[in-house]
């Protein structure tokens, strides 16, 4: 063991391409354990490729990813992943409780049935996101926010040191947003590391300790106040500059008194 | 019936008993595997595997004859078919990976190709003498001709299939439901896929005995799809699917004995009938249930217009008056009011309609939606005379998430463009409920639960009691700390991060 603690996530010169087009080009950053990190960037900026790479699904053309000092390939099961809502078959015949229990699957040897202890952990995870009363519902019979919380519960039940969430705040109601934030804060208090793919710049500063600003290349990595600079954002989000003008005035003293607001 | 009779009956009907046992084993194992095929949307792939096995069967005859010089038995044929199935799936995967050809096209190419290869060799004279494949039987099925050896083969297949499903239940569930997570926790997704393909090949080989290669997919997916319409849990779906598979087989078999035709088609027709009946009558996902749900539902617009009218009239109006003011094509307002009474939203007293407290709550929720939409439309620059009408259309979009979003985006306005109050004391603000401070109105008292982005110098801590003061602007809230009587100003953005419990 090294004397210094390994980074939770260490990405070195990561380059991934689909055919002739690079999706990610020479990305390097390192996340210390216990950080809550937002991954932001415009559509098609390689956010989902980075997620796939972190899960070990795409083979980098060049470079490497280490999780807690180990190669992603050898660290299967160390990442608890919460998929985008659109990626789930909501008609699948599973209940809320079934999904939460999936979080325990990595811990159960294949020949053994799920134990009472594992069931308890899964139920606790449901309690944590306040979904216990829906435990017997089929997952399609929930509101969008509740569906998101079920998958949060699964990730919690997984008890991993690293959580990876893909757009958890997209299209959720205020109660769910709060429930997710609560959980994220609790996991941070427990010293776990969380990476969140996020699209709403207006809330990025409030939610995260560090931001990764992507568009094929790594444009910036650091604390939100350093990242959310109008010049930097303008460079990354070329076409949508207006939004950031609003954003910068909002951080200043006199926010526009227009209904419809800055995050529109 | 004494013992001798019993034995005699068995001897006389040995063929039928064997056929029934064989058919039961086959349909149960097909139905169980079929559940995974339905859930993974691989029906076409299963069809491909079924066709490919012809090549496997032909190859096992030829290889055994050429290498060992004896006739293949049913176990060897099973192994040959298994290889052909796996090879087909591997080839399909290979073509999809290395080229831009999509999976459905790759399946189409590979299964016809491999099927034709089998047919080609089987029809060449030099080889065909060694091959004991009845091509007609292969295509149409022949459960009547089940031998004892076939039964043993079937017993083995069933044992394998059930062992796999029971032992790898969790892995099969997770790889079907969420392959990304399955892979991320180190489940060998590809190996599980091939395991399922192998099981599919095995049950398909057996299924072809009953119904032939064209119809075998029906044994796999029809009972499974029937069960899928009825059950919301995989384990129940598996059991129900096995049951429907049995029903289809026994029903179809006896119909075929009665009419004297081949059992294959009647088994499939029976399964299909069961499916259609279920599609019609399933309690939750059936067509009748859906139709009843729709019929019993009043048009939302009518309900909302009635409620809105009552609220405007202080919660009470003569029923005749309501009918005059509110109408919806095809529905009588009077019977709509009757349904609302059943839902306890209104009370009918003689000729007068009265909102209940729950009804008032619902009506105010509606008014909130209407006024927020008006405010929003105004802010987009729509002219004032159009705003009301458009908002009246849009207020029926009062999905709570959408309305909350508008409210948040508009900065929780207190009044609409006409200066009328936007109600906000019912959706989130119930005594004891946990809400954002930005939702509170002047005069509300609350306990702070999380200070969020509020500066510590304000003296507000978790547990502080506060009373909300007037808003200084649309963006500036005020609150008084009850302990120190100190008044602080909070901007919108910060107010959104503070969570409180209202008294």
Image: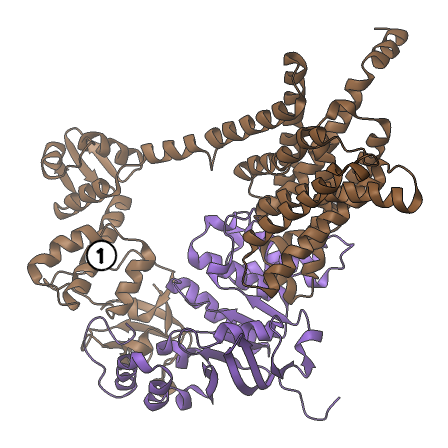
Residue shown at 50%/51% (left/top)?
A90
Q: Residue B299 lies in what quarter of the image? A: top left
Which colour assignment does the render follow? Answer: by chain
Percent x, y of residue B309: 15, 44
Chain hosting mark 1:
B
Q: Percent from the top left, x then y, of residue B2? A: 87, 6
Q: Residue at x 54, y 82 (%)?
A: A35
The residue sitting at the bottom extreme is: A3
Q: Residues within 10 Å of mark 1 (few under 14, many from 20)?
A: many
Instruction: Give whichever of A177, B251 is nearer the camera.
Output: B251
Q: Please tell me whether mark 1 sits on a helix, a strand or a loop.
A: helix
Q: Is residue B54 above or below residue B469?
A: above
Q: From the image, which quarter does the C terminus of chain B lie in?
A: bottom left
Q: Colour of chain A?
A: purple
Q: Taking A30 as reference, is B474 above or below it?
A: above
Q: Position of residue B339 (x, y in %)?
A: 27, 33
- Examine the image and state in which quarter residue B495 appears: bottom left
Q: In the picture provided, is A231 more to the left or to the right than A213?
A: left
Nearest the viewer among B465 and A39 is: A39
Q: Is residue B497 left or right of residue A147?
A: left
- Chain (brown): B
Give above or below for B171 relative to B184: above
Position in image of residue B61 (x %, y %): 83, 40
Query: From the viewer's perspective, is B117 left or right of B69?
Result: left
Closer to the camera in the image, B116 or B183? B116
Q: Is residue A119 visible?
A: no
Q: Is residue B303 visible?
A: yes
Q: Which quadrant, please, contains the N terminus of chain B?
A: top right
Q: How many marks?
A: 1
Q: Which residue is mark 1?
A: B368
């Amino acid at each position: 063991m090294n004397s210094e603690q390994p980074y939770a996530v260490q990405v070195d010169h990561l380059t991934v391409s689909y055919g002739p087009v690079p999706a990610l080009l020479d990305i390097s950053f390192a996340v210390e354990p216990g950080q809550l990190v937002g991954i932001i960037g415009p559509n098609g900026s390689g956010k989902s490729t980075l997620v796939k790479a972190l899960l070990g699904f795409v083979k980098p053309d060049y470079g490497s990813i280490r999780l807690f000092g180990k190669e992603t390939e050898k660290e299967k099961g160390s990442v608890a992943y919460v998929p985008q809502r659109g990626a789930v078959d909501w008609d699948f015949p599973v209940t809320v409780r079934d999904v939460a229990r999936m979080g325990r699957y990595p811990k159960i040897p294949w020949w053994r049935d799920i134990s009472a202890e594992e069931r308890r952990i899964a139920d606790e995870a449901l309690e944590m996101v306040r979904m216990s009363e829906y435990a017997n519902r089929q997952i399609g019979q929930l509101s969008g926010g509740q569906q998101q919380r079920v998958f949060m519960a699964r990730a919690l039940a997984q008890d991993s040191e690293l959580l990876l969430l893909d757009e958890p705040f997209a299209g959720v109601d205020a109660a769910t947003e709060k429930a997710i934030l609560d959980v994220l804060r609790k996991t941070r208090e427990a010293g776990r590391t969380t990476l969140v793919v996020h699209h709403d710049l207006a809330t990025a500063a409030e939610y995260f300790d560090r931001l990764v600003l992507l568009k094929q290349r790594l444009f910036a990595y650091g604390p939100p106040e350093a990242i959310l600079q109008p010049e930097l954002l303008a460079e990354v989000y070329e076409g949508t500059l207006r939004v950031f003008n609003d954003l910068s005035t909002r951080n200043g003293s006199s926010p526009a008194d227009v209904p419809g607001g800055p995050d529109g | 019936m004494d013992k001798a009779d019993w034995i005699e009956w068995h001897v006389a009907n040995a063929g039928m008993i064997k056929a029934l046992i064989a058919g039961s084993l086959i349909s149960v194992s097909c139905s169980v595997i079929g559940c995974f095929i339905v859930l993974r949307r691989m029906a076409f792939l299963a069809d491909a595997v079924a066709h490919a096995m012809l090549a496997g069967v032909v190859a096992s005859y030829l290889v055994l004859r050429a290498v060992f010089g004896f006739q293949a038995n049913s176990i060897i044929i099973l192994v040959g078919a298994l290889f052909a199935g796996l090879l087909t799936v591997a080839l399909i995967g290979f073509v999809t990976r290395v080229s831009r050809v999509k999976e459905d096209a790759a399946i189409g190419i590979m299964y016809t190709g491999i099927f034709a290869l089998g047919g080609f060799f089987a029809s060449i004279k030099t080889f065909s003498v060694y091959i004991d494949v009845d091509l007609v039987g292969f295509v149409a099925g022949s459960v009547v001709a089940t031998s004892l050896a076939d039964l043993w083969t079937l017993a083995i297949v069933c044992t394998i299939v059930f062992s796999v499903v029971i032992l790898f239940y969790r892995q099969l569930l997770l790889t079907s439901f969420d392959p990304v997570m399955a892979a991320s926790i180190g489940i060998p997704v590809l190996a599980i896929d091939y395991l399922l393909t192998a099981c599919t090949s095995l049950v398909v080989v057996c299924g072809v005995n009953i119904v032939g290669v064209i119809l075998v997919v029906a044994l796999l997916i029809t009972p499974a799809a029937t069960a899928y319409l009825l059950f919301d849990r995989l384990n129940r779906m598996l059991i129900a699917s096995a049951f429907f598979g049995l029903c289809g087989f026994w029903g179809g078999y006896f119909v075929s004995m009665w009419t004297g035709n081949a059992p294959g088609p009647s088994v499939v027709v029976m399964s299909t009938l069961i499916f259609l009946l279920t599609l019609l009558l399933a309690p939750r996902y059936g067509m009748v249930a859906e139709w009843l749900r729709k019929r019993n539902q009043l048009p939302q617009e009518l309900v909302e217009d009635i409620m809105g009218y009552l609220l405007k009239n202080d919660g009470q109006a003569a029923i005749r008056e309501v009918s005059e003011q509110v109408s919806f094509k095809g529905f009588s307002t009077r019977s709509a009011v009757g349904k609302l009474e059943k839902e306890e939203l209104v009370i009918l007293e003689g000729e007068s309609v009265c909102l209940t407290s729950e009804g008032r709550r619902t009506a105010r929720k509606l008014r909130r939606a209407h006024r927020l939409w008006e405010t929003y439309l105004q802010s987009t620059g729509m002219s004032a005379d159009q705003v009301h009408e458009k908002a009246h259309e849009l207020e029926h979009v009062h999905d709570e998430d959408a309305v909350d979003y508008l409210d948040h985006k508009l900065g929780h306005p207190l009044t609409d463009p006409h200066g009328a109050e936007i109600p906000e004391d019912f959706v989130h603000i119930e005594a004891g409920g946990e809400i954002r401070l930005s939702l509170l109105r002047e005069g509300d008292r609350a306990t702070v639960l999380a200070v969020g982005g509020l500066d510590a110098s304000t003296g507000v801590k978790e547990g502080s009691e506060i009373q909300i003061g007037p808003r200084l602007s649309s963006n500036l809230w005020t609150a008084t700390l009850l302990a120190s009587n100190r008044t602080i100003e909070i901007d919108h953005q910060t107010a959104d991060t503070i969570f409180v419990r209202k008294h």
